[in-house]
Image (tube, grey):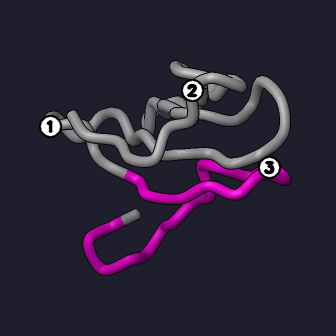
Amino acid sequence: AGMDGSDGRNLSSNAAQDYSPVWSPDGTILVWLRSGIGRDSGIVACDVQSGQTTVVAPNTSQRTYTSVDW
């Protein structure tokens, strides 16, 4: 999206709850927490140019993430 909010696009369209987005220092990657069931929950990274998302650190029964920072 532009600085004024124009030309916005959804980078996280799914049934899970996505929250706590954080930009990479160079502004090319957006990461956030995803709360859902199964392998799609955890820390998600998105290349904002391509829109490609990847779960880079999945939640497990022993590990759940509560914040993201670079």
Q: Quadrant of the N terminus?
A: bottom left
Q: Is residue 45 magenta?
A: no
The reply, left or right, for residue 43 in relation to residue 58 is left
**Viewer-side label of 2, 3:** 2
Q: CA distance from mark 2 to mark 3?
A: 22 Å
Residue found at x 30% / y 80%: 4
Disc 1 or 2, which lies upstream in sequence? 1
The reply, left or right, for residue 21 in relation to residue 53 is left
Identify the image quadrant of residue 36.
top right
* Tag 3: amino acid: Asn
* Tag 2: amino acid: Arg
**Viewer-side label of 1, 2:** 2
Give residue 49's position: percent from left, percent from top.
44, 34
| Residue located beneath label 1 in the image | 25
Q: Do the numbered discs 1 and 2 sit on residues whose CB atoms are within 8 Å?
A: no
Crowdedness of circle 1 by 10 Å Cα count: few (<14), some, many (20+)? few
| Residue located beneath label 2 in the image | 63
Residue found at x 61% / y 55%: 18
The reply, left or right, for residue 50 in relation to residue 22 is right
Q: Do the numbered discs 2 and 3 sit on residues whose CB atoms are within 8 Å?
A: no
* Tag 1: amino acid: Pro
Q: Quadrant of the C terminus?
A: top left
Give residue 63's position: percent from left, percent from top.
57, 26
| Residue located beneath label 3 in the image | 14
Q: Residue furthest left?
A: 25
